[in-house]
Image (spheres, rainbow, N blue to C red):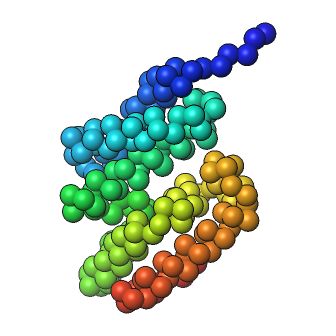
């Protein structure tokens, strides 16, 4: 049984065929318009091409998460540039309006959530990516460390520092944040 080593060009082609649709859907969820989503995917593939040598296996969970993070960050950049930032990443956290009696409370909580999402998106990428994987994808320190090729302690420190920075930014905006 021989070992097949793919060239960078072959890896890129496999990644494109395997993840193109997923990347489009991730981008579309953030930017909400087909043209913006296509732009995000195109830009993400340019970034992937620049980092193709870092990818060993084109079809594996680590590569899948890598391309999703790249397209997500690219789409967030486009949304921010176009002033179309939407509250999508933490949509499961939006309070159920039917369970709340006071409509003003619903508005306040939704506004607070929007601010939290904006501030997470504004964090430096090393913190933002770790927080996204922990809070949204619900990955463990070990899984995050493996995907990002970091030590567990490095991931733990980035999460601590990211949360500390987030709390500071939220406090400046008048929003309290707990772990």
Above or below, 39 against 129 in this view is above
Q: Is residue 36 left or right of residue 26?
A: left
Q: Between 57 and 167, which is closer to the camera in this rendering?
A: 57
Q: Is residue 156 left or right of residue 16?
A: right
Q: Is residue 87 left or right of residue 93?
A: left
Q: Between 153 and 8, which is closer to the camera in this rendering?
A: 8
Q: Residue 63: percent from the left, percent from the top? A: 57, 38
**Residue 122 occupies quadrant:** bottom left
Residue drawn at (61%, 69%) of the image = 159
Q: Is residue 95 visible?
A: no
Q: Is residue 28 visible?
A: yes
Q: Between 138 and 131, which is closer to the camera in this rendering?
A: 131
Q: Residue 65: percent from the left, percent from the top? A: 54, 44
Above or below, 77 against 117 in this view is above
Quarter of the image that includes the N terminus = top right
Q: Between 124 and 97, which is closer to the camera in this rendering?
A: 124
Quarter of the image that includes the C terminus = bottom right
Residue drawn at (40%, 73%) of the image = 119
Q: Residue 147: percent from the left, percent from the top? A: 63, 48
Q: Residue 48: percent from the left, percent from the top? A: 46, 38
- Total number of numbered discs in the rendering: 0
Residue drawn at (55%, 72%) of the image = 162
């Amino acid at each position: 049984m021989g070992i097949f080593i793919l060239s960078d060009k072959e890896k890129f082609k496999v990644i494109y065929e395997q993840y193109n649709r997923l990347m489009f859907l991730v981008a579309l969820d953030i930017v909400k318009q087909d043209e913006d989503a296509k732009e995000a995917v195109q830009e993400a593939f340019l970034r992937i091409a620049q980092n193709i040598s870092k990818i060993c296996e084109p079809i594996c969970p680590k590569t899948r998460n890598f391309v999703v993070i790249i397209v997500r960050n690219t789409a967030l950049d486009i949304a921010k540039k176009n002033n179309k930032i939407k509250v999508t990443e933490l949509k499961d956290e939006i309070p159920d309006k039917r369970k709340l009696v006071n409509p003003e409370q619903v508005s306040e909580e939704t506004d607070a959530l929007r601010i939290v999402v904006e501030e997470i998106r504004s964090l430096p990428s090393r913190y933002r990516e770790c927080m996204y994987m922990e809070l949204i994808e619900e990955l463990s320190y070990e899984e995050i460390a493996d995907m990002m090729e970091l030590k567990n302690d490095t991931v733990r420190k980035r999460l601590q520092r990211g949360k500390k920075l987030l709390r500071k930014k939220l406090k400046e905006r008048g929003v309290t944040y707990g772990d």
